[in-house]
Image: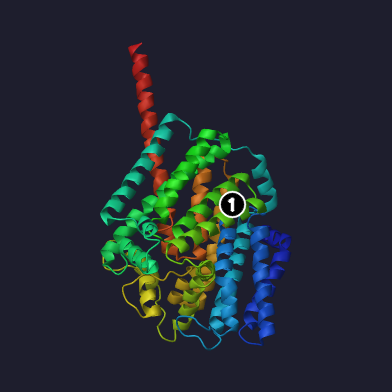
């Protein structure tokens, strides 16, 4: 008890902020716009301070990435929606939704509390430990011939399965629409091609079939690309830079081939996560360069899909970034529990069933049908808080956010205290990106679609292959020794 009391005393400033945040969450259920706005900015600013200062000491961490995605895709437009009473949302609107307000602010507040709890439990000092991490040199323990053979075989299998998927689909929407750019009704053509390629509107089995193959070009090809990138950053050899560039272009093509924009953005940010984690700091100029590249490619794909007017392209890009995700989230709070009862865990269970062969494709498909009142045409993904709310209400959002914050901080602490190995860096970048995607997607999608499970399986497969090659090498040495 004395030890715990000592910890709390050393962090009494944090406890004061926690108490202030609790009071703010309690009184924010009513009041005038000015009062609500002040409370909103205060709670958001407090959470931002916790994430930036106590989550990583200004290094790129899962918590910072999550907070960034939350800010861009939810908070900016979400705050506007709250004060405009949900005007123009796809479902409901017209009256101020205090539950939505309490969810996003209570959620980011309890997320920050989860970070603090992990910091206390593991006696973590972000700035000091990050400084030690930066001083420690990187190592390359994954550099034997068998290791490179294993990673090459993994890449070859992923490339073969991606090509097999393309052959099965019969065409590539990106190439098809590029060829037809001068024709009329290009947007309708692009939309139809993307829907056909992605199997929207077809049976659940075919939809799942596309998801299984997606792992090869969404996770495994980027994994190998980052493997090469980490070695370029370490060795600074021109050959590795060229290989990184070639693999990056090839992987980017496969990610953009369906005309979906988020896989390519996922890959661009993933490369930045690797680079920033290798450097151990967030450099503003380099960050802006990555943002410029990401927005340029996002705009290019928007243009290819049939929007030839520049002003319209800009409008659609900002709408997709700032509106679509918060529209789904806000609408969900309008739907539950007034029009639909809370699922009590069935939403998450349906997502788990959706990754298996069978008729269930998960909560995102159900939400699309309920939200847009059109059936069999796509999915409506929502961030982790949306699905937690649909299952368990506000309590689910707050408790779930607390756990998410704790897990993200714990993961970062384990990484920064581990040995600085390039292979571990690749794994950290993949898992950091996946965890950050909780600001956009649900937990099951993060586990399976965005690569946590696939990355861990890759590590196991590579370690098994490494053991096989090592055992084979020892057998050959022993054979030569006996022959001698």
Eyeballing the image, is 93 above or below 130?
A: below
Report x, y in % for residue 310: 53, 66
Residue depicted at 46% across the width and 70% down the height: 382
Q: Quadrant of residue 96?
A: bottom right
Report x, y in % for residue 117: 61, 62
On screen, residue 38 versus residue 165, left or right, reads right
Report x, y in % for residue 229: 52, 42
What residue is pinned by disc 1? 413
Q: Can residue 455 be seen in this view?
A: no
Mark 1 surroundings: few (<14), some (14-19) or many (≥20) residues within 10 A: many
Q: Outermost residue, top direction?
A: 484
Q: Can residue 220 be seen in this view?
A: yes
Q: Quadrant of residue 342?
A: bottom left
**Which quadrant, please, contains the N terminus?**
bottom right
Eyeballing the image, is 96 above or below 451?
A: below
Residue depicted at 58% across the width and 81% down the height: 82
Report x, y in % for residue 363: 38, 71
């Amino acid at each position: 008890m004395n030890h715990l009391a000592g910890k709390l005393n050393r962090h009494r400033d944090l406890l004061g902020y926690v108490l202030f945040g609790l009071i703010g969450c309690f009184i924010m259920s009513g009041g005038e716009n000015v009062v609500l706005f002040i409370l909103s900015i205060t709670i958001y600013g407090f959470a931002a301070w916790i994430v930036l200062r106590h989550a990583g000491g200004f290094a790129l961490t899962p918590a910072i990435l999550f907070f960034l995605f939350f800010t861009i895709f939810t908070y900016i437009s979400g705050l506007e929606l709250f004060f405009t009473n949900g005007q123009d949302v796809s479902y409901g609107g017209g009256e101020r939704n205090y539950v939505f307000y309490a969810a996003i602010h209570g959620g980011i507040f309890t997320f920050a509390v989860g970070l603090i709890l992990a910091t206390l439990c593991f006696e973590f000092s972000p700035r000091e430990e990050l400084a030690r991490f930066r001083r420690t040199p990187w190592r390359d323990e994954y550099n034997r011939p068998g290791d490179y053979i294993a990673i090459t075989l993994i890449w070859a299998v992923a490339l073969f399965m991606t090509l097999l998927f393309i052959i099965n689909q019969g065409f590539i929407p990106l190439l098809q629409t590029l060829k037809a750019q001068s024709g009329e009704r290009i947007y309708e053509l692009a939309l139809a091609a993307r829907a056909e390629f992605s199997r929207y509107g077809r049976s659940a089995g075919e939809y799942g079939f596309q998801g299984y193959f997606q792992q090869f070009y969404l996770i495994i090809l980027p994994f190998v690309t980052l493997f090469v990138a980490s070695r370029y950053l370490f060795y600074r050899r021109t050959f590795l830079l060229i290989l990184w560039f070639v693999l990056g272009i090839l992987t980017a093509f496969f990610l953009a081939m369906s005309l979906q924009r988020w896989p390519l953005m996922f890959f661009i940010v993933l490369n930045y996560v690797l680079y920033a984690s290798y450097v151990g700091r967030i450099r503003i100029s380099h960050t802006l360069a990555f943002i410029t590249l990401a927005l340029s490619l996002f705009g290019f794909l928007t243009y290819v899909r049939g929007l030839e007017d520049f002003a319209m392209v800009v409008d659609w890009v900002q709408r997709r970034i700032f509106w679509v995700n918060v529209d789904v989230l806000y609408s969900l709070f309008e739907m539950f529990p007034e029009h639909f009862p809370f699922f009590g865990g069935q939403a998450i269970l349906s997502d788990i069933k959706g990754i298996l062969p069978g008729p269930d494709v998960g909560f995102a498909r159900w939400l699309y049908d309920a939200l847009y009142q059109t059936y069999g045409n796509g999915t409506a993904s929502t961030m982790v808080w949306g699905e937690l709310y649909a299952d368990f209400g506000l309590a689910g959002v707050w408790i779930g956010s607390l756990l998410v914050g704790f897990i993200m901080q714990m993961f970062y602490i384990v990484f920064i205290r581990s040995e600085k190995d390039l292979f571990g860096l690749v794994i950290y970048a993949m898992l950091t990106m996946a965890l950050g995607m909780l600001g956009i997607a649900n937990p099951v999608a993060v586990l399976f679609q965005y690569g946590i499970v696939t990355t861990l399986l890759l590590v196991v497969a590579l370690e098994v292959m490494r053991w096989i090659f090592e055992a084979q090498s020892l057998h050959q040495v022993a054979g030569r020794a006996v022959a001698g």
